[in-house]
Structures are given as structure tokens and as C-alpha cells.
Amino acid sequence: MALVTGLIGEELIRERRLAISRAAQAEALQQMSSALAYSLDVNDLFEVILQQAVRITRAESGALILNTGGRLQLAAYHGRGGRSDKAAMAKGDALIERVMETGEAIHIKGDSHPYHELLGIQPPLSVIVAPIPVQGRVAAVIRLSHYSQSDAFSDQQFFLVNALAGSASGPLANSLRYERKTREAITDGLTGLLNHREFRHRLDLEFSRYRRRGTPFSVMLIDLDHFKSVNDSMGHHHGDEILRSAGDLVRRTTRDNDLVARYGGDEIVVLLPDTDQDQARSAAERMVAAVRRNQVPATPARDLTFSIGVGTCPGDASSADEVLMAADQALYFAKRSGRDCSASASQLTRAFLDDPKSLLNEIAESGPQIVVAIARAMDKQDPAGDGHSSRISFFAEALVKKLGRPEGEAELVRSAALLHESGRALFAGGAHLDRNWQSDHPMMDEDVVRRGRFLPELVEILRHHHEHWDGAGTPDGLRGHDIPLLARILSVAEAFEAMTREGATPLEAVDRLTEGSGATFDPQVVEAMAALVGEGERLAAILRTPPLRVQRALEPAAKS
């Protein structure tokens, strides 16, 4: 009787321990299910699933592998003891592929399991591979390994991992659906590249990072040469295929952290973080060479080639809009140079500094296409210092937006700010100390832009940006609303930039502008500037931005 009683007691203790273990494991499953239910971020989801699987089994390594169109992708990883399955993932994994194909979980234990041959590793080894099904297919698998025991994972743990994988099916389906919709919202439907809107968002983020840390970044704007003739001679379906091929080629040729987007039409844009002018120029040259090597037949008579323009912040620009303008204008220069080549904004600037006469000729032929290069060349000779025109451009654009004016006016005032010292540099020989300079330079600016194919509105802004609200300004003595609004805005932006550059705080500068309100300056524009200063951070950010390093940008490029 005592023996029987003892055996019954031991069995009860064993059952109690088992019940406690199962309760703990059930709680773990419930915690995981709760965590999954509130997560739509697929990467967070992968981490939660894998962490729970490793916790249940005490595996030495674990991986969650996503099945993306038949291609295995390592989505989450946990490893100890220096062992890693990452290299194996890159080469493929027969065991995982078997589970993907059959949808059945595998538990390898003992030294003579029939699937040992699929592992390529000698025992002792314990492995669990469990599928996560989504809508009738295996969307992902969990792979858990133990390298020092052949029976490290019990049947109960195998059962629990399967239960966990099953519980993950619904949340994973939701997350993948959410990720797909999110991806569609930011992706160009034809090429699979990021779309223009998402590129612009990422560019603004990269510029914010530059303002905080001073890290340079570059933009490559890529044009598919003679693409119109591809559509005209081969049809739009073939043109779409060429666009897709071009996008794939650009993706393969760029770094993992570079951002590739369709900019519009037949243009592709690449954002290169942490990349200075020389590095960006080298990247563009490699891209041009790569597309030549690939010999993609665009038409029967011509292979696909690229023209590429490169702009860098700082060096070529001091705002997100300016770096795009710089890249676009460098692209224009590359296309004029015969296509199938790359050009950088700094090359244009250096050419204009070396030969001012060539700058006048280029203004006459293609002025609107080289605004940033003109400004950078002028900055080099400007006593106000590097980035002077860019800072005025930023303030003027901010005022246009604060006053609720159309986007086209922001573009106009940006160009006017960048060109507002062009007359002094080109015609006055840098004679900024001449007593007539203040009255003469708007007409000199006007003379410069009249030589090019600029909009008449731009000419008017530059001619009248030194007029005064009370009529005491130059050159025509216009007063009040007779002065073009964008000229009044440029006047306030120029004065604000000069005051803050010379040491005044933004509030002190606004106080001085207010003193001139109704006399020198338009009261409404001064009010808008005061409101911008009151908002604080936006103007403070540009005031903190490191100046353009034009001199360094114009040093001869290092030979590669």
C-alpha cells in the first residue's frame, strides 16, 4: 500500500509540474497573441514571433524566413555562441525549402533522422522548422536549432512551436496586407521604384539630417537618352519594358542604403546619403559605364544609355530644393555635352569661374537651366560669403508660403534670390564699395537676366527689389502696391539675411524690419516675417545650417 501510495504521489507531482509547465507555455502563447494583435509593422511582428519561439524552446539560434515570391528572405534572427544561419540563408536551405513546399513541420532529433542529409551538418543537432501559413500558402517559416544536443527539443516544445506558428498566421496576414498597401502608396506602379512623393519626403528627411549633423548627401538625376524615339519607333509597351530594365539596373548599381525613385516620365533619381561631391561624381561615372556594359537594346539601332546630373549638399546647394535644381541643371549640361555621360553642378560652377565670358554666353543661350551654377559662381566673388544667395532664397520662399501664395511664385522668388547679385559680379568687377552700388545693382541684375530666356516676371522682381514702400527707393521710385509683391518679399528677405549674418538675432532683425515697416518695407510682408520668427524652429534651422563650402567644392576633383 505504501508503495502504491508513493507511486500515486509521484505521478500527481509529475502531473502538477506538467500542468504548471503547460499553463506557463499557454500564457506565453497568449502574451504573443496579444502582442501580435496590436502590431501592423511586419518587422516588429517577425521579432515578436521569433523571440517567443526561442523563449519556449531555449534554442541556441533561431531564424524567421519570409517566402517572397519563392525567394527566401531572412526577416529576423537570434543567435548565440558565434554560430549564424545567415550565410546558409544566402546559399539556400533544403530543409526550409522542403517545409515551404509541403507545408508540414519538421522536428529533427536523434542521430539517425532521415532529414539529416538535408542539413549538411553532422549531429549532434536538434532542429525544428515550422511553417506559418497565410491564405493557403506558406508565407514564412520558423527555424530553431540547438548544436550540442541531439534531443534538445521535446515533442511538447515541437507542438507549442507549431501552435505559435498557427497563432501567428492571422496577424501576419494582416501585417503583410498592411505592408503591401503601404508599399503601393509609395511605389511607382510601372517600375516598382519609389514614387516621386516618397522620394521628396525622404529628401526632406535627409536634408534635416544634414542640418543636424552636417553630413553631406548627393542626388543623381538620370535621364534615359533618346527615350522619345524609343516610344515613337517601338511603341509604348516596349518603352515601359525599357523603363523597368533601367530601374532594375540602377537598383543593382547603387548601394543598399541609396534610395532609388522614379522622378517622372523617363527620369530616375537616386538619393545618396553620406556622399560628397567626389564620391557622387564617381558613382555617376560607374552608372554610365554599367549601362553601357549591359547593352540593353532600346531600339534595333541603339542600346540604352544614361545622361546623369549630380548635385551635392553642401557644395552645390544649401536646401533640398536647391540640390534638386543643381542636379537638374547638371543633367542639362550632360545632355548638351552629347549624352551618354555624367556631369556635376560643381563642374559648371568651376567652368564659369574660370571663364566669366563663357558664363555670359551660357546665360544668353540657356539662362533658366543654369540658375544654381550662376549663383554658386557669384557666391565665390560675393563679399557676403558662401551661401548668401541661398539663405535669402530660403527666407523669401518661406515668406511666399506664409502669405499663402501659389507654388509657382515660390519658384520665381527662389530664382530671383539666387540671381540677385549676378549684375555686380559680372559687370561691376566686384565693386561693392562703390557709392552708387546700391542704386545701380538692380539694373545690372536686370541686364543679366534680360540676356537669358527668363520669364518677364523674374526681370521685374530683380529690377524693383530695392524700391521702398514709401516711394523713396530705386530705380523707379515705385510705391506701395505698385511694387511687384515678389520684389517686396525679396527686399525683406535680403534685409533679414544681412542683419542675421552680421550678428543680429532673428528677434532683433524683426525689430529693425518693424522700424522700417511702412517706409522701406511692406508692412504685410514684415508681419509675415515676424510670424515666421515666432514659429521659431524653421528659421532657426536655416540659421544653424553650415555655410556652403564653395572653395572646397571647386578644387580639382581627385583622380580616381
Image (tube, rainbow, N blue to C red):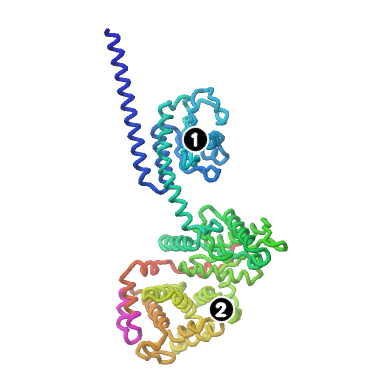
Q: Is residue 261 above or below residue 437?
A: above
Mark positioned earlier in the residue sequence (1 or 2)? 1
Residue 217: percent from the left, percent from the top?
A: 49, 61
Tell me where residue 152 sits by quadrant.
top left
**Whether residue 560 can be seen here:** no
Q: Quadrant of the C terminus?
A: bottom right
Q: Nearer the viewer, residue 408 or 336?
A: 408
Whole-angstrom CA distance, mark 1 to mark 2, is 61 Å
Looking at numbered disc 1 in the image, what kind of residue is underneath it? Arg
Q: Is residue 369 above or below residue 176?
A: below
Tell me where residue 367 sits by quadrant.
bottom right
Which residue is at 48% across, 82% downward?
458
Which residue is at 51% across, 77% downward?
378
Query: Mark 2 — residue?
Result: 367
Which region shows up in magenta?
Answer: 505-525
Q: Is residue 113 above or below residue 487?
A: above
The label on residue 313 is none
Q: Nearer the viewer, residue 560 or 158?
A: 158
The label on residue 83 is 1
- In the picture provided, is 501 more to the left or to the right than 279? left
Q: Is residue 237 above or below residue 81?
A: below
Residue 99: percent from the left, percent from the top?
A: 52, 35
Disc 1 is placed on an element classified as: loop
Which residue is at 37% across, 90% downward?
479
- Which circle, 1 or 2, is nearer the viewer? 2
